[in-house]
Every structure is written in structure tokens, then in C-alpha cells.
């Protein structure tokens, strides 16, 4: 299962979490231990992919990059178990990977898997020392250009700590649905389950325990939705009051739009992709918030866009998403160094269009879930007063976000 998921993620734009959930559902994988292992193999392999490739490449005579995608996925999964999972003995990891190859129709590479993984088991992993970008990138399994951006953002003194934090597994942080009872209802729903519920930062809750909390009845009933504390804090920055009208200029799948609606405001969720807005509608319905959210398909950077004015405008702009690598590790292998500059131009357009829709005395919030000056827009807006710049870091045990807040002058 993990091999199929990883191959699909590498071959296209498939999201690891969505693909894994679909595969587990199709296979009716109900045992919490099996679900946990499948999740560990997928996310662990993606998280440490560069390091795993470094360990594998010397032993693939025909060239690792020339292998079929499923073969690379299988080798990475085997190497991950050998190098990172103490509880799985190396011989078992090798034989189980060969079995997986047969199960997905890749019997022809079982000999290759046996030879390469045995060498990895014998030789282990040798990593460079020192504080160069290249050395840190290999130690923490990141593209070198991302480490360079992190150095510029966090400085030499904090670089390694932030890189280490970025590679840790993110906890299951969720947003309790206020109009369905909030945190108290969540506690009650999980009373007789193996899960534990604790309060998290910025109004989130932390779910721990065996199994998948997103396959529970409480999730199906809309008592909570996954959301990182840093993401929910962006909603805090809007300083919402019941009855306000809010424009979410880049609403996407509606995580922040529904968080705003759950605080008693009326939201216009705009996005250029109809599929994302359909997901936003579905989420709003499940959370019982569809009465408070309207959707509108449009390009938020279109200069001709005219929607009237709003008490609050959120520009949660498209970005590289590097700050979410703990939850979406495949992003590291999909983004390129010039993406930040390309997106930076779009972000500025969105910000100025968003500003045009803020009523006098209203509040404008710009946010990106990444680090790096190229995407952290810092501009002067005519008739606006800059009131706040906010940053969260991986070492805060949350996603890395940058946010700026302005007030429109009366």
C-alpha cells in the first residue's frame, strides 16, 4: 500500500494524505496497527527521501534515477525501515519489501531489492558534518536551496534547530467546531475511545492515541477539522466580531473560511478553482456552517474584480508551502528555487486587489505558510496603516507562517 501511494505521489500532483486515506479505505484496512504502519512508511519515506536516495544510489549499478517509479518507491521504503525503524529487523524489512514488489506486479525487481537493501544494511548511512548548506541539507533530508532560504530567514545560529524541527512529525492538531459544542463536545465524543484529547495553541486541540482520529464518528459528524495552530492564529489576527462580512480572497478548500464562519461572521469564499470551492462547500455542510458561507469562482488577482467592501479581508495567498513540510513532506521534492519569486509577483497582485475591498476602518490580513523574504510581502499600502507583522517557526511546534496586518484609515 505504501509503495502504491508513494509511486502516485511521485508521478503526479497527488497529495500524500488524501492518497493514503483513499488506499486504506479501498483496502478496508481497519486494524490500527496496520494503519499506523502504512502511515509511518509513507510519511517517513517522504520525509527522509533525499537521505534514503543517498544511501541507495551507490548500490544501484544501472543508476537509481533510471529505475521505474514503483521500484524507487520500494527501495526507499525498505531503506527507511532499515535506517530509521529500530523495531523492524533488517532481514524482515528486505523480505517484506520483496513481498510488496510481488504484490504490486514488480516481481522482476525482487533480486535488485535483495541485493541493494542488503548492502544498505551492511554499510549503513554516512552523513557529512559541518554547517554548510549542503551538509545540513543532507543531514536533514532537504533540498540545498531550501536550507539556503532557511539560513537567510533564521540566521546561522538558529538554522540547524529550525531544520531539525521542520523534519519532525507534526502532531494531530484539530480545530473543534464551535457551533457543535467546541472542545467540550470533542472531549465527550472521545470519552470511551483509546484517544486522548488535550488543549493546543490558539484554540486547537491535540489528539493522541492509536489509530486514525479522522476515521471516527466524531470526525464524520463535523465535531472537528484538521488545522495547525499557526493556521488558526491567522484567523485570530482578523479580530472578528459576530455579524461582520468577510472576504476570503484565496479560500481554497475552506479551512480558514469555515473557521471564520464558525465565529459568527458571513464569509464570501473566492477561489479560481471550482474543485476547491466544491470541497469548501462540502466541508461547510459537514460542519453545519453552509448558511454562513457563499462561494464565488474568480481570479483574485484580476484587476477588474469588484465585489464591494467588507469589514475584513483575508489574503491567504498561494505560496511554496515550505512551512508545512512536517505535514506535507512531498512539497520539498516538488518545489523549485524560482517558485518563490514567481509566486511573489502573484502575491503582490492579490494583496492590492484584496486591499481594494476593505471598507474604511476595516482590517486586511495577508498570510503565507512559508518562510523566506521573497514571499513575506512587506509593502506600503495607500490609505492603510501597518499594525502588525507576525511569524511562527517550526521550532514553535507548528507550521511556519508569515502574516501582515493593516487597518484601512477612516
Image (cartoon, helix red, strand yellow):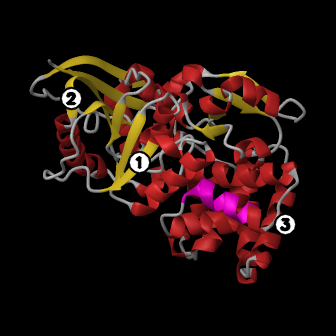
Is 238 left or right of 226, judged from the image as shown? left
Give residue 84's quadrant in the image. Answer: top right
Is 400 left or right of 99, judged from the image as shown? left
Give the residue pinned by disc 2. 359
Mark 3: secondary structure: helix
Distance of mark 1 from mark 2, alpha carbons? 19 Å
Instruction: Please provide percent x and percent y for residue 111.
Output: 75, 77
Residue 22 belongs to magenta span: yes
Instruction: Please provide percent x and percent y for residue 204.
Output: 60, 26
Decide: is 216 above or below 62: above
The tag earlier along the polypeptide, 3 or 2, is 3
Label disc, if present, on residue 294 of the rendered structure: 1
The tag earlier along the polypeptide, 1 or 2, is 1
Q: Which residues are magenta?
A: 15-24
Q: Nearer the viewer, residue 235 or 135?
A: 235
Distance of mark 3 from mark 1, alpha carbons? 53 Å
Name the chief secondary structure element in magenta: helix
Give residue 118's quadrant in the image. Answer: bottom right
In this rendering, which labeled residue sits more in front, label 3 or label 2?
2
Mark 1: secondary structure: strand
Decide: is 178 above or below 142: above
Is 173 left or right of 184, judged from the image as shown? left
Label disc, if present, on residue 404 of the rendered structure: none
Quarter that holds the C terminus:
top left
Label disc, if present, on residue 95 of the rendered structure: 3
Instruction: Please provide percent x and percent y for residue 213.
Output: 75, 42
Amino acid at each position: 500500500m505504501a509503495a502504491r501511494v508513494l509511486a502516485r505521489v511521485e508521478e503526479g500532483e497527488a497529495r500524500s494524505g488524501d492518497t493514503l486515506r483513499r488506499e486504506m479505505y479501498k483496502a478496508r484496512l481497519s486494524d490500527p496497527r496496520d494503519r499506523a504502519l502504512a502511515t509511518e512508511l509513507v510519511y517517513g519515506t517522504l520525509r527522509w527521501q533525499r537521505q534514503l536516495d543517498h544511501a541507495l544510489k551507490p548500490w544501484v549499478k544501472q543508476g537509481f534515477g533510471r529505475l521505474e517509479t514503483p521500484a524507487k518507491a520500494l527501495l526507499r521504503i525498505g531503506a527507511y525501515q532499515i535506517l530509521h525503524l529500530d523495531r523492524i529487523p533488517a532481514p524482515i524489512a528486505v523480505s517484506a519489501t520483496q513481498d510488496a514488489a510481488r504484490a504490486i506486479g514488480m516481481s522482476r525487481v525482487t533480486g535488485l531489492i535483495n541485493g541493494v537493501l542488503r548492502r544498505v544494511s551492511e554499510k549503513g548511512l554516512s552523513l557529512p558534518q559541518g554547517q554548510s548548506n549542503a551538509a545540513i541539507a543532507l543531514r536533514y533530508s532537504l533540498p540545498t536551496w531550501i536550507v539556503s532560504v532557511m539560513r537567510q530567514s533564521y540566521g546561522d545560529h538558529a538554522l540547524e534547530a529550525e531544520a531539525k524541527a521542520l523534519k519532525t512529525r507534526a502532531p494531530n492538531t484539530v480545530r473543534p467546531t464551535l457551533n457543535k459544542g467546541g472542545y467540550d463536545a470533542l472531549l465527550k465524543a472521545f470519552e470511551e475511545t483509546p484517544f486522548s484529547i488535550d488543549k493546543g495553541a490558539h484554540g486547537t486541540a491535540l489528539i493522541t492515541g492509536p489509530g486514525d482520529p479522522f476515521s471516527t464518528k466524531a470526525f464524520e459528524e463535523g465535531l472537528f477539522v484538521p488545522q495547525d495552530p499557526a493556521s488558526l492564529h491567522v484567523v485570530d489576527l482578523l479580530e472578528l466580531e459576530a455579524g461582520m462580512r468577510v472576504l476570503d480572497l484565496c479560500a481554497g478548500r475552506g479551512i480558514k473560511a469555515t473557521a471564520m464562519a464558525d465565529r459568527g461572521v458571513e464569509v464570501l469564499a473566492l477561489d479560481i478553482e471550482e474543485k476547491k470551492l466544491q470541497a469548501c462547500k462540502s466541508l461547510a455542510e459537514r460542519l453545519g456552517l453552509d448558511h454562513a458561507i457563499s462561494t464565488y469562482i474568480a481570479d483574485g488577482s484580476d484587476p477588474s474584480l469588484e465585489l464591494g467592501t467588507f469589514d475584513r479581508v483575508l489574503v491567504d495567498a498561494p505560496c511554496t508551502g515550505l512551512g508545512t513540510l512536517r505535514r506535507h513532506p512531498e512539497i520539498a521534492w516538488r518545489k523549485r528555487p524560482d517558485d518563490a519569486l514567481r509566486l511573489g509577483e502573484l502575491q503582490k497582485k492579490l494583496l492590492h486587489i484584496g486591499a481594494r475591498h476593505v471598507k474604511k476602518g476595516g482590517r486586511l490580513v495577508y498570510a503565507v505558510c512559508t518562510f523566506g523574504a521573497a514571499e513575506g510581502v512587506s509593502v506600503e499600502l495607500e490609505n492603510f496603516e501597518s499594525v502588525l507583522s507576525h511569524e511562527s517557526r517550526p521550532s514553535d511546534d507548528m507550521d511556519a507562517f508569515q502574516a501582515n496586518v493593516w487597518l484601512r484609515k477612516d
